[in-house]
Image (cartoon, coloured by chain):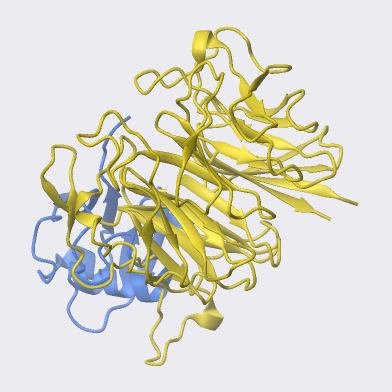
Chain colours: A blue, B yellow
Amino acid sequence: MIRVVLPHHLRTLAKVGDEVHVDLNGNATVASVLDAIENKYPMLRGTMRDHRTHKRRPLVRFFACGEDISHDPQDRQLPNEIVNGREPFFIIGAIAGG
Amino acid sequence: MSGVRVLVGTRKGAFILTSDGKRKDWKVDGPLFAGWEIYHAKGSPVDPNRIYVSQTSAWFGQIIQRSNDGGKTWETPGSSPDDLKGPDGMPKGESNMFVYDGVPGTHMWYDGTQHPWEFKRVWHLEPALDDVDHVYAGVEDAALFESKDGGKSWKELSGLRKHDTGAKWQPGAGGMCLHSIILDPQDRQRMFIAISAAGAFRTDDGGNSWKPINRGLHSQFMPDPNAEVGHCVHHIAMHPKKPNTLFMQKHWDIMRSDDAGDSWREVSGNLPTDFGFPIDVHAHEPETIYVVPIKSDSEHYPLDGKLQVWRSRSGGNEWEALTNGLPQKDCYVNVLRDAMSVDSLDSCGIYFGTTGGQVYCSADAGDSWNAIVRDLPAVLSVEVQTLK
């Protein structure tokens, strides 16, 4: 089980609390986590990445174990701490503007 | 008992203001979709309980919300448990998927170079006149989309964007937005749209092909002030019983057409300034129109700090200032293009919202005004539903 922390506005959109949980079939990567979130919460499709190209939206960032992995390949394996649920995977709205 | 429901879109959420037919005492609900920009909310003329909302964010993109109960509850179409499954058994969640038809191509950028068409947001939602699930969306960068399944999926009516003049369209200060959609109630194949800064267009075949309708517009800032396209049209309005007559608030100039847009003439008359954004028509008097004059294109606030709606009862040229109840000193708000609306009660109500967060109502066609609310976030749009 992967723990995911969504930004505030996506929590209200999906009507969920501070953290959501998803189960993966196979490798734990940014892409597979996003796939699982979008399958469970289809109203979030298009809000984190492009519907078709899956390119990350410019003001959305991904963090794992304190590291900004926004620019890493989306098929990169996530750290064990994320995979085993000890650490949450963070999806963050970039701090932009006041 | 009759009443009104005012749908207000703001920079930080939507609000619903309701009152009985007297329009004196108001209930304010909201914010809905708190923290998101609500560019537009509009109810279906077929069923007023069906309301569509454009919810946007620079961070998270476009969202379409829909209510089937007059705004009590909301859903993103295509995301409920009952309609999640497509033919392949997977969730769809495509209500915010606005994809241009084919290769998007380019339009003119601010500096005169060509720039790729890029979807940014939905500015205006126009529910169809005869089908609660049919709705049009005017978007930035300028294009027209439609949904025939209640907003679950969208298809571009690409004949507009692919018009021969498309490469000459350019963004106004607010972006290259398709902000006005007017459906002709007497000819279901006819529709008018307006784009800033391209101009007005008309289709006579249900959206397949489009014709620029800008003859008579004069825009001094353009290399050719009388060009076929490139005009910064801020808003257009029509009375449903007189669909060949259109009124336009252009960047500068109030314009009028009596031949469905084929030609226009200026009717700014005695207005103190003819710059502004909204324009609307009285519900029962097709020749009574309203504008909110703004000082200039460089100073987006009322002249001398006095907020004034101006009314013409002659379809333009002769105008009178309506000030009773509006601030007449130290007022420096703006009224945006989709932030004025009218109800259809016997005594026509006029409504507008400001960038200062006030929503004003006149229950007597503009003779006197009261603020329904004074401290909302900046108002982007106002639509009124008359409930009978």
Q: Is residue B40 left or right of residue B199?
A: right
**Residue A30 position in % (x across, y down):** 19, 67
For residue B32, above or below residue B136: above
Please count the marks in the image.
0
**Residue B385 position in % (x across, y down):** 71, 51
Q: Is residue B29 left or right of residue A29?
A: right
Q: Name the residue nearer the viewer: A76 or A95.
A: A95
For residue B120, above or below residue B30: below
**Which picture quadrant has residue A4?**
bottom left
For residue B215, above or below residue A1: above
**Which picture quadrant has residue B207?**
bottom left
Which quadrant of the rendered structure holds the C terminus of chain A? top left
Q: Residue at x 56, y 28 (%)?
A: B357
Q: Residue at x 22, y 37 (%)?
A: B224
**Residue B59 position in % (x across, y down):** 31, 48
For residue B292, above or below residue B62: above
Which quadrant of the rendered structure holds the N terminus of chain A? bottom left
Q: Is residue B235 left or right of residue A26?
A: right
Residue A17 seen from this side: no
Q: Residue at x 82, y 34 (%)?
A: B25
Residue A29 seen from this side: yes
**Which picture quadrant has residue B75?**
bottom right
Q: Name the residue nearer the viewer: B310 or B98.
A: B310
Q: Residue furthest right?
A: B1
**Residue B280 position in % (x across, y down):** 61, 40
Q: Name the residue nearer the viewer: A72 or A2.
A: A72
Q: Residue at x 50, y 28 (%)?
A: B355
